[in-house]
Image: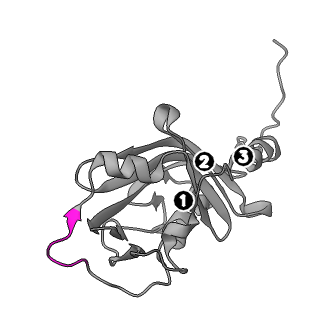
Amino acid sequence: MNSANVGTNDVYCIGRRVVSGRRRLAVYACLGAFSLLAFAGGSRGAEAPPPNAKAMTATELYNLYRDKSWQWSDGAGLMQADGRRFTAWAGSGDKATWAEGRWTVNDKGRMCFKALWHSSSGVAPARTCFSHKRVGDTIYQKRDPSQNWYIFKHSPVAEGDEFNKLVSRDLVSLNLYKLRIAIKPATSRPKGKISRSKKK
């Protein structure tokens, strides 16, 4: 399951249940994570890697993504080498979200983001993964678990390659700082009661 399953009681965010009985909170908290699903290869034609394509190693993936920002239409994600920290922001206004977590790589060609996404309606965890294969300097990518392969990086690099959206600049920290201040998650109050703060 790759999107929010808007049922009566449960909401899923990228394959896992994150909130039970709080549908609105989870859906808004997942908006930023869904941006990750939309920005990578969403409009590209399917092109399966040839039989001789090899899964990229953890070292290759680390060198590809470390200390890079990945741009998308309404935000960006930053993969820092220090502590494998992953931060991101997406959206604007009432739909603005920010995320903080980690990014991981393995020798099976997979790179994943695992983070908590914060919105004005609450916080929800999300995990997004991409698989990679290569033939020479050509890199193929697909979003897991079931999306189509496409060429992430041609050899030589083509103008429309998703690879070009990986930049060696921090496009996240300033917006993250602003959103941390601006976004104040809503807190639920018992019905029929007046909430009063207690002095400590």
Among the 4 quarters of the image, the one containing residue 59: top left
Q: Is residue 27 visible?
A: no
Among the 4 quarters of the image, the one containing residue 49: bottom left
The residue lying at 77 percent from left, 44 percent from top is 184
Residue carrying label 1: 33
Which of the two residues, 172 or 128, is positioned nearer the viewer here? 172
The residue lying at 81 percent from left, 11 percent from top is 200
| Image location (x, y in percent) of residue 121 | 69, 52
The residue lying at 52 percent from left, 54 percent from top is 21
Would residue 7 appear left or right of 171 to someone viewing this image?
left
Looking at the rendering, the stretch of residues picked out in magenta corresponds to 49-54
Residue carrying label 2: 99
Q: CA distance from mark 1 to mark 2?
A: 8 Å
Whether the magenta-drawn stretch holds residue 12 is answered as no
Task: Please tell me the numbered disc located at residue 187.
Answer: none
* Circle 2: residue type: Ala
For the rendered model, the colour scheme is: one colour
* Circle 3: residue type: Leu
How packed mark 1 is, by other alpha carbons closer than 10 Å (few <14, some 14-19, many 20 or more), is many
Tell me which secondary structure the magenta stretch mostly adopts.
Answer: loop
Residue carrying label 3: 176
The residue lying at 26 percent from left, 51 percent from top is 57
Q: Secondary structure at mark 1?
A: helix
